[in-house]
Image: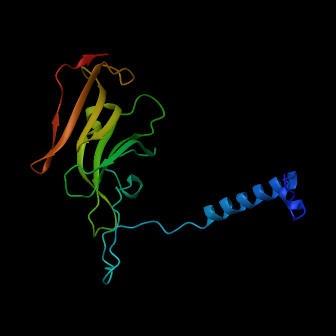
Amino acid sequence: MQQSAVPELAHTHTRPIHWVATATAVAGVVALSSVLQPNPATAAQASGPQSHNAPATVTAPDPADVDLPLDCGPVKMLVVKKASGDLDGDGRPETVVVAHCDAPMGTPPDAVYVLTQAADAKKPRVVATLINPKDRTTVTSLTLTDATVSADLLGYSSDSVPSCCPDVKTSAKWQWKNGAFVRSTPAGAQSV
């Protein structure tokens, strides 16, 4: 075996300090790369002048911005459920809200309203009443799927049934057809 003409170098043997230095350098590179990220990709074309009239994201109407036609007298009105989506196919979302008065006793009846906001309007407005509070109905669930509003409802078989104890359970669906919301009720209302 032939001996090397170059004496052994001290840095050719790994020591714990070398591993600490390497780990620190790798950690620094990882930390720096997480801070320095490229700009997110966009679908806009880079060539030509960009339009300042690009459509903004359309948000659904906020029930807090609308005076709902529900007379609650001295108690406040509560929005207890809401769902949003494009119900009429115009590309702008509507909001369906379930609201009732914050009654101190009993089960206050719910009202269901559809809200919309035109592109040039400052405030949203009520465009339809799906359930009137005079119907003495309680909405237990509300969903909006494929431009269809669905609700599970509790009601009363007669005016003699106390407000505390609804005795009829039904479901209802509404769809926008020919300029109005059309209600369909699946067969088979059930007694509770």
Q: Is residue 70 visible?
A: no
User: Residue lying farthest front?
Assistant: 1
**Residue drawn 40% across the image and 45% down it:** 73
User: Closest to the observer: 165 or 6?
Assistant: 6
Which quadrant, please, contains the C terminus? top left
Q: Left of 53 or right of it: where is 177?
A: left
Q: Is residue 5 above or below residue 73?
A: below
User: Residue lying farthest left?
Assistant: 178
Q: Is residue 87 above or below residue 101?
A: below
**Residue drawn 87% across the image and 64% down it:** 5
User: Closest to the observer: 74 or 95?
Assistant: 95
Q: Quadrant of residue 117?
A: bottom left
Estimate the x, y position of residue 166 in percent, counting from the top left: 33, 22
**Residue drawn 49% across the image and 69% down it:** 39
Estimate the x, y position of residue 164 in percent, counting from the top left: 39, 23
**Residue drawn 87% across the image and 52% down it:** 15
Q: Is residue 130 above or below residue 184?
A: below
Estimate the x, y position of residue 51 in percent, counting from the top left: 31, 79
Q: Quadrant of residue 125?
A: bottom left
Q: Left of 25 or right of it: where is 97?
A: left
Estimate the x, y position of residue 6 in percent, counting from the top left: 87, 65
Q: Left of 68 or right of it: where is 41?
A: right
| Figure coloring | rainbow
